[in-house]
Image: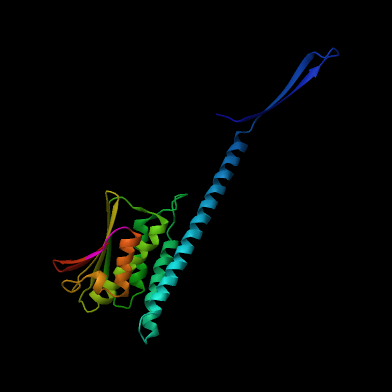
Amino acid sequence: GKWVWEQGQGGYGDAGELSALEVLIMDVTEQRRLLEQAQADAELRKALLSELNHRVKNNLATISSLLYIERTKPTQDKNASIQPCLRRVEALAELHAVPSARISGKVSGHTLVRRVTSATVSGSPPPHPKVSIEMSGADPAIPADMASGLAMAASELIANALRHGLVHTESPRLCVRVTTADSTCTVEIIDNGPGLPEGFDIATDGGTGLNLVWFIARKQLGGSVEFTRDGGEARATL
């Protein structure tokens, strides 16, 4: 269809009767399209600004909590305290590099996990393991308020595998697998290291990093985390 603008003017005789009618009709379809586009762009900018403010607020609160956790740890090695904080902040930074869907503010789970894996592995001390990343099922659209938790938990599990599971392993291998089925997203961190001790309970036996993963999984993501070993592979499932 078309949009038109109309304006009319009558001509009258001496007796006041209508003797002529002048009508101007203009096609304003293009002007209307430009107006609607400008309104849509303004709504998008408003939504993106709101999302950015939300992300920054959440991330600053998370960083504050991480610094508080490290401050309360009894350690004399400042570098040992700073390094985990830096890695966790870098995991949050990867979230900002992932484009969001228009208006909804949701991010690609596949892209987020790929970026976090790359950043965590490249930021770890050498030697680096052979890394593979596998994706199956639909790309999960992660809400912005859950994406930071996913980034943090995935980074923590990968760092734990690198730091403890593979540090003394010959030909170390690390696989990060993301599976989506029935509205559930599962992230598996699989390595060929020795795995955790028999009877390990993350809620009671884990250090700061794994306790953080447990809290995020249960409280922020509404999910769970478990550790298993099968056929020479240690597996963390989020």
Residue 18 visible in rendering: yes
Q: Quadrant of residue 98?
A: bottom left
Looking at the picture, tell me which residue is in the foreground, 115 or 70: 70
Magenta stretch: helix, strand or loop mostly: loop
Residue 117 visible in rendering: no
Q: Quadrant of residue 73?
A: bottom left
Q: Quadrant of residue 109?
A: bottom left
Q: Residue at x 23, y 73 (%)?
A: 172
Q: In the rendering, at what x and y percent does residue 82 appear?
A: 40, 79
* Image quadrant in which the N terminus is located: top right
Q: In the rendering, at what x and y percent does residue 142 appear?
A: 37, 55
Which residue is most to the right?
Answer: 14
Number of on-image labels:
0
Q: Residue at x 36, y 74 (%)?
A: 123
157 relative position to 49: left or right: left
Q: In the rendering, at what x and y percent does residue 41 appear?
A: 55, 47
* Image quadrant in which the C terminus is located: bottom left
Q: Residue at x 38, y 78 (%)?
A: 70
Which residue is most to the left?
Answer: 231
Looking at the picture, tell me which residue is in the foreground, 19 or 67: 67
Span highlighted in magenta in the image:
222-226
